[in-house]
Amino acid sequence: MQEEAVVQALVALGHPVRLKVFRALVVSGTPGLTPGVMQEGLGIPATTLSFHLKEMSGAGLITMERMGRNLVYRAAYERVNGVLTYLTDNCCEGAACALEPVSVACDC
């Protein structure tokens, strides 16, 4: 993963509202959430939510799929795992780590 993409993802997650939305999408798993459900559950006005969804989508942190009349948003686990891998690459000063790596991938 390129450094610029990692910075963009971290900036997108650096806003409290976007972090709440992203965490809600992670909790929802593969079924995802519609904007209406997110708006109601998080108490975010529609225009504010729309703005933040656009920012996270631009950073590649979420995906959107049209299902009939609804839009369904999901966390982009591969992208987030790429960011985590980038951040932890060469941990332990390049030496073999004392701890076994733990998978952060969702089995959703």
Image (tube, helix red, strand yellow):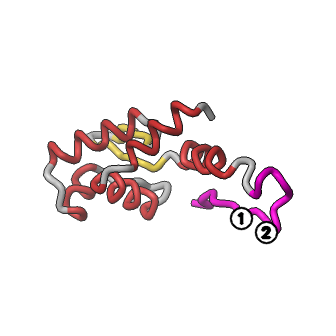
In the image, residue 64 lies in the stretch drawn in magenta:
no
Which quadrant would residue 98 be assigned to in this image? bottom right
Give the residue displayed 37% in from the left and 41% down from the top. 56
Q: Amino acid at mark 2?
A: Leu
Q: Residue 100 or 68: which is nearer the viewer? A: 100
Labelled disc at residue 16 = none
Q: Is residue 90 above or below residue 69?
A: below
Left or right for 84, reference 51: right
How far apart are the alpha carbons under marks 1 and 2? 9 Å
Name of the residue lying farthest toward the bottom: 99
Residue 65: % across, % down:
40, 39
Q: Determine whether label 1 and label 2 are within 8 Å by CB.
A: yes
Q: Which residue is mark 1?
A: 102
Q: Residues within 10 Å of mark 1 (few under 14, many from 20)?
A: few
User: Magenta segment, principal secondary structure?
Assistant: loop
Residue stretch in magenta: 92-108
Q: Residue 21 or 72: which is nearer the viewer? A: 21
